[in-house]
Amino acid sequence: MAFVRACDLGELTEDTPKRVEIDGTPVSLVLTEGEVFAINDICSHANVSLSEGEVENCAIECWLHGSSFDLRTGKPSGLPATRPVPVYPVKIEGDDVLVSVTQES
């Protein structure tokens, strides 16, 4: 599993998604509840950026239709989305946020 530097930890603000691109994959990084999560940035229902949505209770909400996705599993918690979005492993080394998009979990 290859980890790539996504950003500096200091660039993340609690409960505010940050969109990055890693090896051509759009990823939304979220610092919440003391952890950093990486989830594919494209909603499985509407094909829009999740990083423009709100974060609450370890979930990110799609701004277009209101589907929320668990940041730990990618599973939707309600309609209209029915398919999960990929989540990616995250490591923190010093001030670097590292993400692996080569193996989805």
Image (spheres, rainbow, N blue to C red):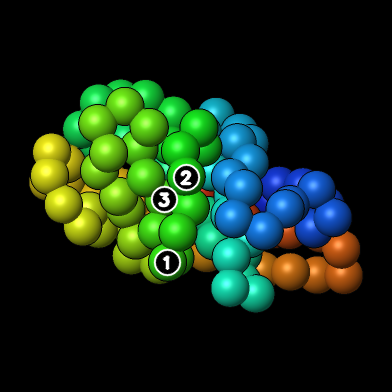
Q: Are marks 1 and 3 in contact (CB under 8 Å)?
A: no
Query: In terms of depth relative to the viewer, which is nearer, 90 or 32?
Result: 32
Q: Are marks 2 and 3 in contact (CB under 8 Å)?
A: yes
Q: Which residue is mark 3?
A: 60
| Residue at image location 13% in from the left, 38% down from the top | 80
Vertical position of residue 89 compared to residue 22: above or below? below
Query: In terms of depth relative to the viewer, which is nearer, 64 or 92?
Result: 64
In what quadrant of the picture does the N terminus appear? bottom right
What's the residue type where badge 1 is placed?
Answer: Asn
The reply to whether residue 52 is visible in this rendering is yes
Q: Which residue is mark 1?
A: 57
* Relative side of 10 to 13, left or right: right
Q: Earlier in the sequence, mark 2 or mark 3?
A: 2
How far across and how far down the image is residue 53, in percent? 46, 38
Query: In terms of depth relative to the viewer, which is nearer, 40 or 62?
Result: 62
Q: Which residue is mark 2?
A: 54
How far across and how far down the image is residue 52, in percent? 50, 32
| Residue at image location 22% in from the left, 53% down from the top | 76
At mark 1, the secondary structure is loop
At mark 2, the secondary structure is loop
